[in-house]
Image: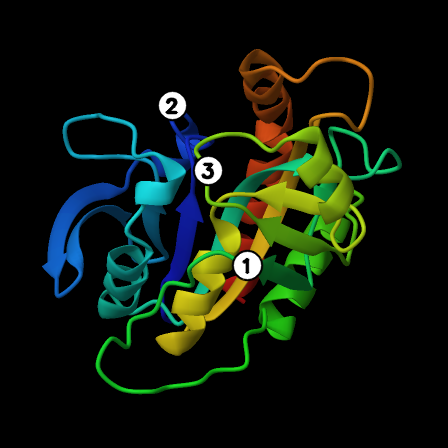
Amino acid sequence: MKPIGIISGTVLHGTDFIKGLRKEHMANEFGRVTLWVSREIVHVSRHDRDAGEYILPHLINHQANLAALKALGAGEVVAINSTGSLKKNLPPGSIVVPDDFMLLADTPTVFSNRPVHITPELSGEVRRRLIEAAGACGIPVVERGVYWQTEGPRLETKAEIRMMASFADIVGMTMAAEAIIAQELGLSYASLCSVDNYCNGVVETPLTMETIVEGAKKNRDTMLTIVGKFIERSRR
């Protein structure tokens, strides 16, 4: 059985999820990557450096991360992404399995010297199994949604949020880039998105980083439960 690739932010730090995994370092043509590995899982923490420094969203080396997962045998990738809600009817605490995405900034690629034109998409098979895993845990999820990726590291203006809300449901800084690179490398990729906050201006309460971090902490156990069930069901 091929291991499952898992990409997350800081949500797995200090949890039982990565206990028992061995730490490995890998260098590939795109850069160096730190991974946590077992027979069943190959995990990359997208914001981590070896020295414990935080990698800002716009500096993440998605090409190196995904290439490392492929090199260690992963055929499919589940990403855990923190997002903000663009809609009042999608409150913090919601879990979304997006079915499409938008990335209008510079698009990353592993092909620098030849034209390779993919039609971007998320894996319907991995999405289906994530939704089924959530159902098996009795956890409701929003089964469709459009993810809009911004560059970061700044948050969005109220005017930008009003515009985005006409076309998308959630916003983040990493998922679309990962999905594109994964598809270029032949990896099946889907995302489990936690809605940790309302975006700037969606509600009257001012948005702060403290609000975002607190929302992510509240959603952590729910996200880990779903991913754990996904892995368990994949062993069958």
Asked whether 6 or 39 is in front, the reply is 6
Identified by mark 3, the residue type is Gly
Q: Position of residue 59 (x, y in %)?
A: 30, 43
Tag 3's secondary structure? loop
Amino acid type, mark 1: Leu
Residue under label 1: 103
Q: Do residues under tags 1 and 3 come within 8 Å of each other at their CB atoms? A: no
Q: Classify residue 126 as left or right of residue 98.
A: left
Q: Relative to 176, is 69 on the left or the right?
A: left
- Residue 85 is at least partly visible in this image: no
Disc 2 is placed on an element classified as loop
Query: Which residue has dot 3 on it?
Result: 152
Crowding near the residue tagged with mark 3, few <14, some 14–19, many ≥20 C-alpha atoms within 10 Å = some
Instruction: Locate the C terminus by quadrant.
Output: bottom right
From the image, tell me which residue sits under label 2: 14
**Residue 115 position in % (x across, y down):** 33, 87
At 33% across and 33% down in the image, what residue appears?
A: 19
User: Closer to us: mark 3 or mark 2?
Assistant: 3
Q: Secondary structure at mark 1?
A: strand
